Image (cartoon, rainbow, N blue to C red):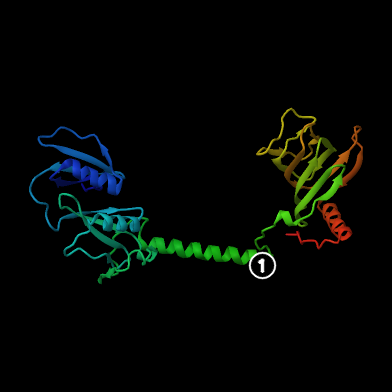
Amino acid sequence: MRARGFTHVSISATDLEESIRFYTDFFGMEEVPSPDFSGPVRWLRVGDLQLHLFLDEDPAPERHHFALDVDDFEAAYRRAEELGVRDGGRYSSVRELPDGAVQMYLRDPAGNLVEVNWPDVTTLDREVIPEIQKIGGDPEAVLYLGPLSSRTLRHEKEEKSMTQERTEQVISDLGLPDQAIQSDELPWVPQGERVWFKPLRFDLATGRWINVLKVEGSGKVNRHRHTGGQVMGFCLKGSWHYLERDWVARPGTLVYEPPGDIHTLVVDEGVEEMQTLFILEGTVQYIDDNDDLIYQDDVFSKLERYLKFCDEQGIEPQDLRY
């Protein structure tokens, strides 16, 4: 037979209500039902374990203690300083153990010594905790035996750093730096009667382009079919619908159009202006009522139209090929 683990720690309290408040307020423990013993007891839950408090007027042992792992050591340090509950005797210093784990000692309302732990000193802000006493000894002396060990955390941190470096290198090699396109610096390019588009991106490698479509007053965009990719639209202003559908896109509406879909975009009477952000792939084929092709647009024709308009208007075009 051997023990499988701890179920609880039991400590004394000279005032049960005061101790309950301390552990629930400071550590966020949850009070759970307790049985009726010969004397008053209160039980608290902490993770999968419990802390049991029993009423006792005798002083707590000076050095007997239990330890708690917390999710924010710096916050615990600040709170302990605020309340003045850090031990003022032999355990007054914050300590770093040989494996990099950290200890801090508090006194609860009954005088019980409570150790607060953190797995990795390198993750702490030394401006918040300026003084940490380093304890010597065998580096194989490990406080955390599970996945929260300082070695594990440092390894994960190093792995994450290496992954980030590799990712940044790949992005650099591909020539894909981040972009911030200011749409108010780009022109509205005429597309039809009272219809304009504002280009935001031309991805020549994938055939994808992004633009804002604007229609002033009521009107429509000729019946068309999308081939070679899907279309996503997000309505920014006004409202519109497809003649072949029964829904209406208003500001905040996201529209998805599958490849091969045929429809006619309509802006109804009474709408002064409609603007919608579209992300398009492949080709837009404009067709008549007999499904005969009138003309078509793709990323190259849209880019050509943008550059031609800038040349005619004497506008310096932005390079939107990213």
Residue at the top extreme, as displayed: 246
Residue 92: percent from the left, percent from the top?
A: 21, 64
Q: Is residue 35 above or below residue 80?
A: above
User: Which picture quadrant has residue 147?
Assistant: bottom left
Residue drawn at (19%, 39%), measured in percent from left and top? 42
Circle 1 SS class:
helix
**Quadrant of the image occupied by residue 129:** bottom left
Q: Kindly identify the residue that appears in the image at 87 percent across and 41 percent down.
A: 286
Taking 62 as reference, is 294 left or right? right
Quadrant in the picture for residue 55: top left
- Which residue is under mark 1? 173
Q: Nearer the viewer, residue 28 or 160?
A: 28
Residue at (32% x, 59% y) in the render:
118
Looking at this view, is 236 or 90 the one in front? Answer: 236
Where residue 227 sits: x, y (%)?
A: 80, 43
- Identify which residue, 307 or 263, lies in the foreground: 307
Which three-letter amino acid code belongs to the residue tagged 1?
Asp
Q: In the image, residue 186 lies at what x, y percent?
A: 76, 56
Q: Is residue 185 visible?
A: yes
Decide if residue 144 is in sight here.
Answer: no
Number of numbered tags placed on the structure image: 1
Q: The C terminus lies in which quarter of the figure?
A: bottom right
The residue at the far bottom in this view is 136
Question: For this rendering, which residue is in front, 131 or 165?
Answer: 131
Name the outermost residue toward the left: 58
> Left or right: 158 with respect to 212?
left
Could you tell me residue 293's position as x and y percent? 91, 40
Q: Is residue 41 above or below residue 298?
A: above
Q: Residues within 10 Å of mark 1 (few under 14, many from 20)?
A: few
Relative to residue 21, is residue 169 drawn left or right? right
